[in-house]
Each structure stands twice: as structure tokens, then as C-alpha cells.
Image (cartoon, helix red, strand yellow):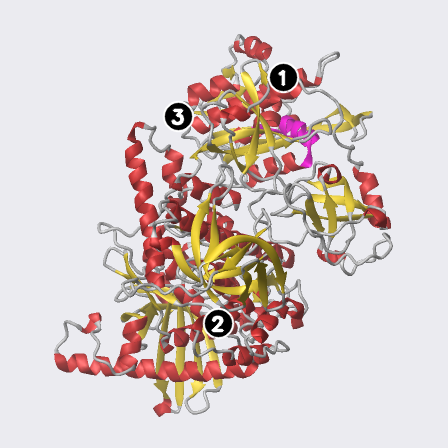
Amino acid sequence: MIKTEKILHLKSSRGRKVRVVREHYLRELVPCFSSLCQADCANDGKLLPGDLTHYVVPDAEVVVKYLEILEFRELQGVIFTQTACQALHSKGRRFYNRLRSLVKDPRHNCVLFANEFQEYSYCPREKGESQEKWQTRCVYSAAVWYYNHLAGMMNVVMITEDDDAVAQYSSLNSGVFVITVQDYLQNFWPELQAAHELYSSISQALQEKENEDSQKEFTEHLPAEVLEAGIKSGRYIQGTLNVSKHRAQNEAFIMNEGLSNKNTGAGNHNLSEGVLVYGSKNRNRAVHGDTVVVELLPKSEWRGKATALIEGQDEKTREDSESKPMPTGNVVGILQRNWRDYVVTFPTRDKTQSQTRNSQRILVIPWDRRIPKIRISTQQADTLQDHRVVVRIDSWESSSLYPNGHSVRVLGRAGELETEVQTILIENCIHVPPFSDVQLREMPINSPERPWRVDPAQMQERRDLRGTRLVFSIDPQGCEDVDDTLSVRSLADGKLLELGVHIADVTHFITEGSLTDLEARSRATTYYLADRRYDMLPAVLSADLCSLLGGVDRYAMSVMWELDAQTLAVNKVWYGRTLIRSSYQLHYELAQALLNGEDAEVPELARLGSEQRDRKLAELIQALEMLTRVARHLRAQRDRGGALELEGVEVRAQLDEDRNITALVPRQPLEVHETVAECMIYANHWVARKIQEAFPYQALLRRHPPPRLELFSQLVDTAKARGFPIDTRTNKALADSLDRAVDQQDPLVNRLLRMMATQAMSQAVYFSTGAEPVDQFYHYGLALDCYTHFTSPIRRYADMVVHRLLTAALQVERGSSPDRPLASNREVEEMAQHINNKNRAAQRAQNMSTALFQCLYFKERDPQTDPRCVADAIIYSIRDNGVLVFVSEYGVKGPVYVKNKEGQVVSVEPDGSCEWQSGSVRRYPDHITTTSSYGTSTFRLFDHITVRISVQFTACHAATLNMGVISNKPHRSAETRQPPSQARSQLVQEVVRLAEEAQEKAAQRPKLSREEREFRQSRTPNLYSLLEEVRELALMDLETVSQICMTTA
Ligand SMILES: [Zn+2]
């Protein structure tokens, strides 16, 4: 080993120059991470494959400026040098971490080479040599080393932005090609259009940045040390900047969970509602989501937040009424930027903009109103008019009113279905590319030529239930991915009863840490949008080998309880891996019909002789009856504990053979739904107990915190207006009082109250058992002391984690050690947060896509003439200048104004019809009145009124539905009208049809890009996907229930 000295010239954050001398050890052996290595390098972990056309070594400057391009998964054989890595580090920790995770991620074909430790590639800096030139020389030397080290078996390309280096090194004949980034992309990746576009967009942004003027628009941020000291002393407050959706220009709040109970030095003010940051100067370049530091303003400068409903989105024209002043502050520094990809819209031509040279600087408008306009430089301003484009923010200097950014890729024309769906995905950070070939190669094969078979070795390890248990599944009609099955049988001459829940053994097929596992982990869930879904797992698993279909052998993870046949007390529980063959794939209606003693055809028995059929049928019915009895008992047990039934499933899909929805019919509440749900809840609960016992500090559970009682005030007040007392003191009291709050005349009343109760609830969340005290494990909605998710591993990653924990627990129990080291408490908690975030994103995306379909549906109709634009609405909340209503026919909620911007009020004629007149409005707790020269009109809670629905378009944001009252009387639908739920499914179908027609018409326009097409992975042109979740809903897990309330209710 050779020791040298390395001299670094670093710039401190204050701008001082520091000279650092470091001892530097050189080695002969530094791993090359290539599978072509002939030199016995200690190559551990990820290797560059040998079957590529070339390896590419980017210069330090290229990594610093164009890391985003190197992040394309299509690029293969990328070698990052230590030199480049250090250069990136000096740009900022955020970028450095991005590179590190890139190198770690096995889905990216790149490695890190410690070139400065390699004896033969290291080059000391020469006297007078600039840092940049030296870095380029180091990288070149590393590239040459690779070429020689691999004995010329692999082409090596170095990319640099330094033209001198291209000229100088190209003439050396070292075997290494030295070219510019642009040449590289053009020659090696001509098809990768997205990378080309990104390159020109970044290089333009960089060029523009050089021409910045330096006039100050904002106060400088304080240095990190000052911020930290200030937070410690209590002078400053740290939190996340949350910009108000409706008043994005002026109102933002600093939210921090710790704020309420922390003693801040800022006069011990009550900060539980957060700190208001008013106006853009005070916001000081912080962007929604950033972690910021604020200082409170003197009390005399505090303000209140605005309270009225906002009509339209025009902030300036409203004279807002404000609440009482609250702690108000200004941003003094930013601890962490949390910038993501933003979808923006290019403005139409007349609104543009300064022009410099060939390119234009354009202010683009983010789709998310909370994000400020972004300035980007582009030559495509004309072609991109009215298009939605993904952009990233690069910087926000104190000299600039707006942040600078660059475009990443074009999504398409605003207002078109595909563009809008992509927008929703990106805005929710949902990344669901098609599964790659490498990922698919990890999958087992099951084809007609090579059918999948049970592995004899597995037969040894698993308990074989095939001959001994009657296993069956009950799912919605047409369900493809069956992840749970049931069995029940009587033992010991009827003294005992055995209940079994058998779940698809997904983790048998997916090794922890494999590419498919990583993909599933980063997705965390299957995403359901109104017209399609994006699966968490490849179809060979989710629809085939992990689907517990009838008549085929499948691996399962089972929980089996031995119960006393009389008292149903648990004698013992068995957990483990099994081999099953489901005998019946039932759907809910069929199972219920069998239970009701109705004459129903079971397809599996259709071909049997009558005697055999009768015997088998009797056996099946007996099993279903036993199951029902057990489930009733379990349900009663939880009811005594206070389990809640909230507003949830109320529609189901009827499907034809092609899985098209033929009808959506209001759900007949079938007991068998609850029966299946109860068994799943039971299994989840017992698995939670098992893994919690085995791993008290690192198991993944799911808790549902009790709601804050003050959040129930709207529910309580609203119910009171109708004469129903609601008791929220315990979950039991709440459940009972909701059960009693039934208006015989109007079933919508109870539904609305349950919806409000759902909204007041906190969300159920995953957590690690080491991160919470045991008394916080409680699941309020299900009234269980501990709970987890075990029963849907095909579409929830949490269940896969739990399957692995259960497997490890069983191994520990047997005295062997787990296959892999267990994740620590911290890791499990991080995983839990990740999954929680993804679930929230999935929920938001689903709601947004439903809203999108509603808007696209009404876009095609003339509200003045089309009868479908007129609907019945029920009032559920009273506001200052209007009411909030719910239109059950379309599942739409929103405001109806009784006073407009011009100050006119709604006046009701004797026949109920409404007109705008000048007048005044007065709000009461349970009603609102308008008074004009024609008299006084009243709108009460729970009144049914008639509204006209129209769409309000804004080019840059999501369209919204407007509702205007046209009569204070209920809208009586004509006899011929279809049931509401059916209208909803037609809504989706029709929008899809229109979008497809529009696409055909636009054949002269360029076809969909590959990217756009790929995004249409596993598209289902109907609501099937959404409604398939019906079973999930039946579990009454609140998160999903509230989700459906938003979408189908
Ligand atoms: Zn090697």
C-alpha cells in the first residue's frame, strides 16, 4: 500500500476557502464490479453484466449537471467514479444521497468505482491545474484503467462536457472513446427521446442561470448553524410548510406535531394550530412541503385566517372575513427542500414573456395551486402551448421572484384523458412503469408448454391439506386474484371445530431484496383508478400462481384454530405453510343463496351425477352454515368491544365474461360478506398477536387511534338538527347511536351521518411495535387490542412484510434462526411510514381520478338542456354564504352558493324555482336564510334541493364541478331513470369511449409515445378494479371505507 498526500481546496458554507491535507492510501486491488473481471477483484454485490455493448464513465461535471439523465433505467453499464461522487457531494447532500441510492438500487445498472484509491488509476493534482481539469483527468484515467483491467473485452466510453478534453483524449488511442453527452445520447441512445429532451432542457436552464441579474427580491436565508442554534434556544420554530389550497398566494401554515406541547421561547404561545405565514415575502422562497424555520412576528402583526367559502378561485376579488389573529411568522431559513416532480401547463402565446436569443423564458403554471409559478427556458414554448409538462425546480435565488426549473418530459395536451391521468399519477408521486424483463425473469414460469408444478421438496416442508379439508373461496363475482380461502370442519365427534384461513403464499415466490420485491416495496400497494389499475405484482403471480383458484394446487400460509364446538373458545392455534387445493370458487350471491336454501347452481358440481351432487352440495352448505355461526359469534364479541360499522360498501359490480360491468346494483347487504370479513379480521388479529409476541420491538402492526372528540362536533350538531343524539364518548356508544340515527323517510340521512363519522376518524396506520407503547396498539374501528394485515399479500406490501415476520417467528419457535437477519425497529418503522405515505397517495389518486371522470362526463353535456345535468342534492352543512351538498346519483359533494360575488342572493319562487335577486343572507346553526324584496327563503340541513351541474374549466388546473340551486324542492327523477349506481358506471364507460373516439379522430396527430402507451399497463375499461375492493371494504377497515365514501358514495 502506498501513502500519498491529497490536498483539497474546499469552500465552506460561509464562502471561506479551506485547504485540507489528507493522507491517502493507494491499493492495488479496488473492486471493479464487472462480471468480466479477470483479476479476482473482491467484487461483492451488484455487478455490471458482460453482455453490454459498452460501459460508460461520466465526467464529474456531467454527474453534477446531468445526474437526472444518468438516472434513466435504460442506461446500462454506468461507472460512477469516486471523483465524480465527491464533486457531487460539494453541490449538496441531497444530490449525493441520490447518487448513493442509485448505486445501491439493483434496478439501476450502475456501480461506484473508488478510482482515487486505485494505485494505477489515481493521479495527483498538478501544480497550477484547475480543479475541473484535474477531475476530468482522474475520470479519464479511471476509464483507461477499466479498459485495460478488462483486457479490452469491453468498450469504454467517457462522457464529458469539456470540449478540450474530447479533443485531447480522443487523440491518445488509449482504447477509450471520449465524447460529449449530446454525442453519446445521439449515438448510443437515439431512441431514448426523453433523455434527449431532458438534456436540452437542462443545458438551457444552465445557460440561462449564467445570465441572472442580482437584484434582491428576498431576504437571504440564515446559515444552518444559526438556524440550529435558534431552534435549540426556542427563538425559531421548525416545521413543514403547508400552503393553503384555496388561498395559495397568501396563506401558508407551519405544521409540526411537536408544536402544541413544545415550550417555545416565543412567549409560550399556543401553537397547536400551527404558525401562519402570510404573503410571499414572509414565505421567503419556501415551497409547499419544505422543512423550514420560522421566526414569530411581534403580536401586533399577527393575522387571522380567512373563513368564507371561496367561489371560483379568484383570491383578489374577495373581501375575506378573518378568524381571530393567530401566531404569525416569517421564514428565516430552509432545512430541507422537499421538491418533487411537478406537472405544469405552458401558457398560451399572448401571455408570454421575455425573449433572449433563441430560447424563451417562460413562467409555467403548476397544476398544484400550492406551488408557485416556475421559470423555465425553452425553445418549444410555441409547440407546448396548452400542454402539460413535467418540470423540476433547480434553484430559487434571492434575486428571483420565481424559482428556476427545467422541463423533464411532455405529458400531452391538457384536458385529454391520458394526459390528465398521468398528471394525477405524477402529482401523487406514483411511479408505476411496466415490469422490466429482468424483473419478469425472476418469476416462475407457468405456460401450456411448461406448466408450473408443486415442488417435491416443498411437499416435505408444507402441511398438505388437500385430502383432509374442504377449502373454498368467496369473492365478488369475476374476481381473478383470489388471495384468501377458508375451510371449516368438525372434529372429535362434533365436540371441536376447526376453522382455517388460507392466504396466498406470495413470499414463497418473491425473495426479499429481489428486483420484484424492491418494485413491490416501492409501489407498496396496487393502485386503483376509476378506469384502470396498476398492480403491485406481475400478473403471473397476482392472477395465476398466487391466486387460489379452484381445482389447482397452490401454496398457502395458513392459520387454523381449534375451537370448542359449543362455546367457540379457542383451544389452540396453528400457523404455517400449507399446500391446498380449493374445491369451490364461490361468489357472494351464490354463497348467500346456498345459505338461504335457495335453488342455486354451483358450477363445480354441474357435471356430477345427481346423487353425488346432492351429497357434495350438502357438505358445502354445512360448511357455510358452520362458518356463518362462527362468524356471528366473532362479530358479537367485537360488537361488545365497540366495533364500528361505518358507511361503506353500497354498490357492487355485475360482470360479464369479459369482465365488463353490465350493471352496478345497490348492494343487498348479504350476511356472507360479513362472514368472510370476520374470518379475515380474525386471522389478521391472531397473526398480529403471534408476531408481536415473537418480536415485541420490530413487528409491523396496524393501529387505529381514537378520534379527537372535537372533530365530531359537526356530526353531533348535524345529527342534533334532525333530532338524533350522537354519543361519541366511546366507539361502542358511537356505534350504537349511529345505529339509532335512522330516518325512516330518508335513508340518505343515516348514510350522511356515517360518512361524517368516517371523516372525523383518524386514519388507521402501520407502525413498528418498537415505536409505540403497547397501549397505543389499539384498533379503534375494529375494537381489537392489536391488528395487522395478513390476508391480501397480492395487493399490499404490508402483508408481505407480515408473512415474512410470521415465517421468522415460526423459525425462531422451532429453534432455528431466521433465513435473513430481521429488520430493526427503525427499519420497520421507516417501512411503515413509507407504506402509509403510499396508501395516502393511492387514496388521493383514486379520489382525483373519480373527480376527473365526473368532470369529463359533464363536459360533454349542455347543462341548460341536458336533463342529466339536473340532479337531487341533500344539504349536509351550512356555511356563511352557502351550503354543502351531496348528490348521491353521481357521488358528488360540493358547495352551493346562495349568495354570489355580485352580492345577489337566491330567492325562491312559490313553485320552488330559484332566481338571483339583490338581498342579504343570514346563517344559523341548522339553516341559512336569504332575504330579498320578494321575501325570505330558507335552506335547512337535510333538505333535498335540485341542482344543476356544470363543469368549470381552468386550463392549468383540474377542472371542477359547479353546482347551482335551481329549486328548493327535491328533484324527482323520471320513472325511466336508472338506479344511481348504474349511472355511475356508465359515467366511466362513456368517458372512456369518448376519449378513445377523440384519439381515433386525432389520427393525424402523432401517436402515443411509447411511454404513454406503457403507462396503460393492465388497463380495465370499467369500474371493476374499484369494485373489486368491495371485499376489502367489507373488512370495514376505516381507511378504505373513507376512500370509498369519497368515490362511490
Ligand atoms: Zn476486476
Can you see residue 812?
Answer: no
Q: Which residue type carries mark 2?
A: Val
Residue to which mark 2 is pinned: 749
Give yes or no for contact between labels 1 and 2 (Cβ–Cβ under 8 Å).
no
Which residue range is magenta in the image? 80-93
Residue 770 in which image quadrant: bottom right
Badge 2 crowding class, 10 Å Cα cut-off, few under 14, some 14 to 19, many 20 or more, is: many
- Look at the image and tell me whether residue 1039 can be seen: yes
- Residue 378: within the magenta? no
Q: Is residue 761 left or right of residue 197?
A: right
Residue 554 higher or lower than 900, as above or below: below
Q: Find numbered disc 2 in the image and state the secondary structure of the residue it sits on.
A: helix
Q: Residue at x 60, y 34 (%)?
A: 373
- Ligand 1 is within 8 Å of the C-beta of the residue at disc 1: no
Mark 3 to mark 1 CA distance (whole Å): 31 Å
Q: Nearer the viewer, residue 253 or 12?
A: 253
User: Mark 3 belongs to which amino acid?
Assistant: Glu
Q: Residue at the location (34% across, 28% down)?
A: 1006
Q: Secondary structure at mark 1?
A: helix
Local crowd at mark 1 within 10 Å, few (<14), some, or many (≥20)?
many
Is 36 or 529 nearer to us in this picture? 529
For label 1, the residue is 137
